Amino acid sequence: MIETAVALLFAHVLADFVLQTDAMVRHKRRPLVLLGHVAIVTGASWLALGLAPAPALLALIAVSHLLIDAAKLRWGGVGFRGFALDQAGHLAAIALAAGLFPGAYAAGLWAGPAAAPFPMLARLPEAMALAAGLVATVWAGGYAVAALMTGVDTPAAASLPRGGRLIGKLERLLILMLVLAGEPDGIGFLIAAKSILRFNELAGDADRHVSEYVIIGTLASFAWAIAAGYATLAALDALRAAS
């Protein structure tokens, strides 16, 4: 079951946060765009499962993704609440699919008799768990923080184009690496380093708006990365326990 769940999770984050372009997000209310996104999710799921003969599972993934995304477009809004409910719905659908069809991954090419000559494929679920953790931490984390900051006025400050977004991705990547390496204490040094680098910028700011904006965004980014990092560790431990 855990291999099926990890494969579906990997396909989901890949389709939602890497293969789904900004243009697709902007025009998602168009039926063809929404259906195209659902087709990508379904195709990625089938490929991650090793082209397993599981039409009922794939139908469940496709229909649930379509309904959840349509509900978000209708009622979800653009803030963090809509983002969180949308992703919670997708995770629940993945858990349901893995629970109903636990042997789907084992029936696919990556784990079936055809994989016997390729022993490295036995580690593919772990690779997918790591990749899912990377995407969830770095890319999905960016969307989550942006959604959280939707209701916060952006301070008018000179900075590099998309500089804050790139810094956020790098810091979440570093946190993920520290968690996976078993060195979470290093996160404290990362926080201290960022505080020192930001001190001169914020110390002379008469308006507290900029400093509060930076603190909220930083804490949200760090919290997301830590949670995603430990979730990735839990998935890896579950895979190793099941093997």
Image (cartoon, rainbow, N blue to C red):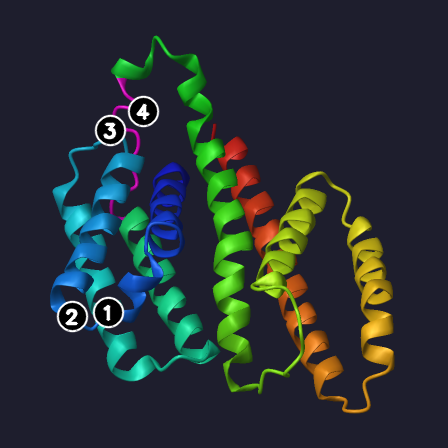
Location of mark 1 (residue): 27
Where residue 185 sits in the image (x, y, percent)?
82, 51
Location of mark 4 (residue): 110
Q: CA distance from mark 1 to mark 4?
A: 35 Å
Q: Please give left or right for residue 169 compared with residue 16 in the image.
A: right
Q: Main secondary structure of the magenta part?
A: loop
Quadrant assignment, res 145: bottom right
Location of mark 3 (residue): 107
Q: CA distance from mark 4 to mark 3?
A: 8 Å
Residue at position x 27%, y 51% in the image: 97
Q: CA distance from mark 3 to mark 2?
A: 36 Å
Q: Earlier in the sequence, mark 1 or mark 4?
A: 1
**Mark 4 or mark 3, whichever is nearer to me:** 4
Residues marked 3 and 2 touching at CB (< 8 Å): no
Q: What number is the disc on residue 15? A: none
Q: What amino acid is found at the position of numbered circle 4 in the picture?
A: Trp
Q: Secondary structure at mark 2?
A: loop
Q: Nearer the viewer, residue 181 or 239?
A: 181
Residue at position x 69%, y 51% in the image: 175
Rendered-image quadrant of the N terminus: top left
Q: What amino acid is found at the position of numbered circle 1 in the picture?
A: His
Q: Nearer the viewer, residue 188 or 164?
A: 164
**Segment tinted magenta in the rendering:** 100-112
Q: Earlier in the sequence, mark 3 or mark 2?
A: 2
Q: Work out whether 145 lies above or below 116.
A: below
**Mark 1 or mark 3, whichever is nearer to me:** 1
Location of mark 2 (residue): 30
Where residue 193 sits in the image (x, y, percent)?
84, 58
Q: Please give left or right for residue 168 compared with residue 189 in the image.
A: left
Q: Earlier in the sequence, mark 1 or mark 3?
A: 1
Residue at position x 40%, y 55% in the image: 17
